[in-house]
Amino acid sequence: MTIYQVAARAGVSPATVSRVMNGARVSAESERLVRAAAAELAFTPNRTARRLRRNHSEVIALIIPDIENPFFTALARGVENRASAGGYSVVLCNTDDDPARESTYIGIALAEHMAGVILAPAGDASDVGRLVAYGRPVVAVDRSLARPGVDAVTVDNRAGGQSAAESLFAAGYTRVACITGPSTVETAQLRVEGWRQARDRHGTGGDELLRYADYRVDGGRAAMADLLALGEPPDAAVVANNLMAAGALDALRDAGLTPPGFGLAVFGDLPFASFTRQGIRVVDLPARELGEAAADLLLGRIAGDDGPARTVVLRTDRSPREKK
């Protein structure tokens, strides 16, 4: 079975069949016709020959910090959906925000001739230079990289931090703290900047109400306990990811506090069914859409798009919703 037979059955050119099988962009109707014809004829591309022609496999690497976090699970699903539709498989790599582990996975992606990499960077110094040097496309997702030639897909974290804090001030809370991730991670800093904008507008508290943690449950628990031990503790907090929020709720419960008695605004929905969501404001994050957009960019680069690097910024929920 050849692509010429598939093209004849679909009523398109062999070049169109090739583009569909290689993950390049064609019209939705052309893709539908080609895939239907391929299914009818039981056509399977010769993957070994294609790899030799292209000097890379039909596999992409997705390198993320924490697969146990539902946010990254949803992001991975978005990547896999798009990659599979384009004829690519996805290898999932978990770094635990460790730059050394991240560097190891990047080396594996090169050694295995993977077609490209989607990366949620572990920090500012993520080692993507080798990928760029070898001509392997790389897309940063959730967190951008200040490096020429690297596409990025992020959310508007600054606006999200501001809207989360504003929602708490609007509800009548006056000392709104912020628990964010590591200072080396872009998302953590941008969410702090948004919180500061709202805090400065309302003129209550300062950076004594700011705590950096590790984007994990234990980090959120310790940060909240530290804030509650202040001589003048906060009456509300913006928490920059869902796992830290789970830990922060533990600390509040230990202190005899619960939302909405203590205000809480969280980036991303809480991960554990055992936690009540009542009274908690949630900034919805478009995790699956992030993954889909990152995969679309990467597949375009693999197919030959050599235009300038692009940054796609998706909006967060401008009005955090309170769980009932």
Image: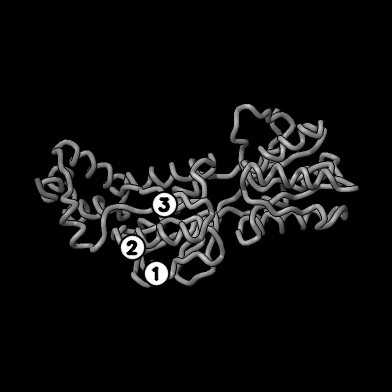
Residue type highlighted by circle 3: Leu
Q: Could you tell me how far apart the alpha carbons at marks 2 and 1 are, in whole angstroms? A: 8 Å
Q: Could you tell me how far apart the alpha carbons at marks 3 and 2 are, in whole angstroms? A: 13 Å
- Categorize mark 2 by other alpha carbons within 10 Å: few (<14), some (14-19), many (20+): some
Answer whether residue 241 is visible to the viewer in this image: yes
- Categorize mark 1 by other alpha carbons within 10 Å: few (<14), some (14-19), many (20+): few
Labelled disc at residue 258: none
Residue 109 located left or right of residue 246: left
Q: Nearer the viewer, mark 3 or mark 2?
A: 2
Residue ID for mark 2: 110
Asked if disc 2 and disc 1 are in contact, CB closer than 8 Å, the reply is yes
Q: Quadrant of the C terminus?
A: top right
Residue at 70% x, 54% y is 212
Answer whether residue 259 is visible to the viewer in this image: no
- Residue 136 lies, with reference to residue 119, above or below; the image says below
142 or 12, which is in the foreground? Answer: 142
Residue type highlighted by circle 2: Leu
Residue 278 is situated, as x and y percent measured from the top left of the image, at 71, 29
Residue ID for mark 1: 130
Residue 167 is situated, as x and y percent measured from the top left of the image, at 76, 43
Asked if disc 1 and disc 3 are in contact, CB closer than 8 Å, the reply is no
Q: In the figure, residue 321 lies in which quadrant?
A: top right
148 or 310, which is in the foreground? Answer: 148
Q: In the figure, residue 124 lies in which quadrant?
A: bottom right
Residue 64 located left or right of residue 23: right
Residue ID for mark 3: 62
